[in-house]
Image (cartoon, helix red, strand yellow):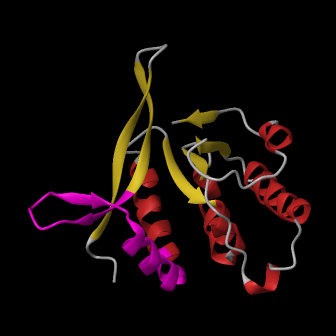
Amino acid sequence: MFKNYRLIAQPVYDIKHKKIIMHELVIGKKAGKKGSFTKIDDEMSTFFEENYSSFINWLQKELMKIVAKKVYPKISINIRSSQFFRLETMKMFEKLRIYNEQIVIEITEDLVQLPESKSHFTLAELDAFLYGKIRSLQAFGYEVMLDDVGCGSIVWNGLCITCLLFQDLKFH
């Protein structure tokens, strides 16, 4: 099902120290020419959402291959905040926690689409829910960052309070 997809490593460069500090893994799809890939788009996002359990299993296996081989000393992966409403997401991170020192989790800004079972959440309850997920990731030993701050809709009402949870914010 995912044979045409790959995780593509993009170096993250620290200008101050003039070195690559990690590699951000993004999903790409084979695009015709040998060795040519396109980055994830809306069509792929819909495909992943419709096949979420299979997608997250594929992602976990691909991540395990990369971290087990220690291809890169440190990697980061992007997770949309709406993915925290899927049990499979946290189960994946629980299974990958043995590699927590190699993996940075970047939470990207997105419009949180609440599942029907959570549609009653107020903004404060949504903040509390997401705060709990972030704290769980940190308890698993992961470094957690906010990614693309300012490029989308802030999903947390109290961003200043939430920022206290993070060591790093990436502004693009």
Q: How many tags in the picture?
A: 0
**Residue 133, position in %: x, y?**
77, 60
Q: Quadrant of residue 129?
A: bottom right
The quarter of the rendered structure image containing the N terminus is bottom left
Question: Is 75 left or right of 90, judged from the image as shown?
Answer: left
Task: Tell me if 170 is positioned left or right of 75 in this view.
Answer: right
x then y, percent, for residue 113: 67, 72
Left or right: 76 with respect to 82?
left
Task: Say if 14 sits above or below 56 in the image.
Answer: above
Give the image location of residue 159, x and y in percent: 79, 43
Quadrant in which residue 15 is drawn:
top left
Name the residue: 72% across, 75% down. 114
Q: Residue at x 71, y 73 (%)?
A: 85
Magenta part of the chain? 27-55
Magenta stretch: includes residue 2: no
Which residue in the rendered view is the most extreme toward the left?
Answer: 33
Q: Is residue 161 above or below residue 153?
A: above
Q: Is residue 40 magenta?
A: yes
In the image, what residue occupies the spot 58% across and 35% down?
170
Whole-percent x, y for residue 8 in the image: 33, 53
Residue at 34%, 77% (x, y): give it. 2
